Image (cartoon, rainbow, N blue to C red):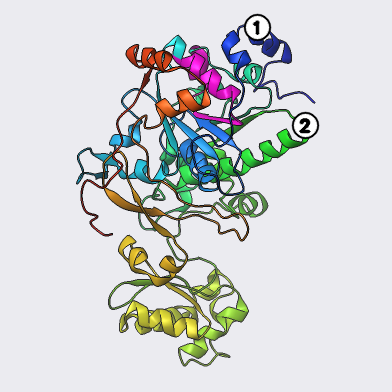
Amino acid sequence: MTHDRRLVKDDGTIEELRKTIPDWIKRLERPATPSVVPRFGPLEGIRAVGTGIIVAQPYIGTKLAEFGAEVIHVERPGGDTFRFTAPQLTRGPRPHGCDEAEITKNKLSMGLDLKQARGIELLMALWKISDVWMESSAPGTLERAGICNELALAVNPALVIVRVSTYGQYGKDEYLGRPGYDALAQAYGGMMNITGDPSGPPQRAKTYTGDFITALTGWASTMMALWEVKKTGRGQVIDLAQYEAVAQTNGNTLPLYTGEGTVYGHAGNRAPGFQPYDTFQCSDGWVFIGALGGAIYDRVPVFLGLDPAEYSYDACSKDVAAVNSEKGRELDRRLRAYCATRTSHEVETALNAARIGCARVYSTRDQYADEHYAAREMTVPVLDRQSGVPIRVYGVVPKMSLTPGRIWRGAPSIGDDTTDILANMLGLSKPDIEKLYAEKVVHRTEPFTTPQVDAANP
């Protein structure tokens, strides 16, 4: 079995590059794994190193780290972009981006300058002792610096390599060098076209949805590749294009277009072909009510005191014509009138008692105060080691009965674990480490290990 030549040129190139590996890296033996992080979870024993920035690639590492993998986040001099992007934690001695505070929980941070030859050499050493290398850059960027798939596989033939980019590592050339971000992947991947109110423009799905979908796809593909390593001992390259991760979630749009010739547009929260499936305003906020399918729908007219035979599924909900019929519009009006005179909690309670799906539209304040969130440990207190501010981060998903994940540490400071990684994983002496700091090949910001301010919401 050979690699896809668009991602790995040939085994001959790997063999030639193997001759260039420094002897000390060839002799390097893998230390105990984990070496620095606690032992827990089903991924205990896996080590991953990530050199990418923003959300898509780093969040793959977050999911690995939640379940016990030892994940090293390599940071450029000065720290990653999201360390300094709004919104920020500003109440402590050092500001810190809230996105980074969430996404780098459980990780180790190594400050490393990959623009220096010695920095690339240290990256090679990390490859040698790791199972996974993840990165995110436009195709060709790393290659121009001498960092490539073939070199990584020459150092470690069992290494899983995850390359994250907006448009992929190959394809039509004019796409490959373009700048890429979450929203661009949403636009090109089709998500933006079906998001937003029909009376307004297409909208970006919030909270970097394209990035997170890419990361979840990347997490799954990483585990598949590690399973292949277990079977054959061979690593491989994963080409993870953001737009493709987004496009695969567009559901019925491609069958609808190719089978019926219809382009699905942005329809807002409301489902165009059945009801109720929409947001409804209450006296103090909003709820979402969903009754998908005839068996669930039949409970709605009964709940509203309407004749279920007259306001049947066929009459009001089976397709676009039924939803927009006189009876269909009347059912919607009655449901909205019911909600408008009651609190969101009253509506949620009553509809769920009637076995009609309904949930309040929660803010972060609601999540923080909710007893179900608390019972499932979905908000976890940690100390942000960059800012010194005590915060909460989201808990482990999913829950596992035998080997559960855990959140054991908040986000590290920039380069927090550099010395430990150099000494405990790579086996470098104290003088060698001091020289690397003096030459600014590596860097570290002293972390805050105790809260520097009180939590705004503990």
Residue 137 drawn in magenta: yes
Element carrying mark 2 = helix
| Image position, residue 250 (x, y; %) | 56, 51
Residue 59 drawn in magenta: no
Residue 19's disc is 1
- The answer to whether residue 350 shows anywhere in this view is yes
Nearest the eye: 260 or 356: 356
Q: Residue at x 28, y 59 (%)?
A: 458
| Image position, residue 231 (x, y; %) | 77, 36
Q: Are marks 1 and 2 in contact (CB under 8 Å)?
A: no
Q: Which residue is mark 2?
A: 232
Kindly report the distance in space between the C-alpha atoms of the residues bearing marks 1 and 2.
24 Å
Outermost residue toward the front in this view: 430
The amino acid sitting under disc 1 is Lys
Tell me: 387 left or right of 312: left
| Image position, residue 30 (x, y; %) | 61, 26
Residue interval drawn in magenta: 119-144
Please determine whether, in this image, residue 366 is positioned above or below residue 152.
below
The amino acid sitting under disc 2 is Thr
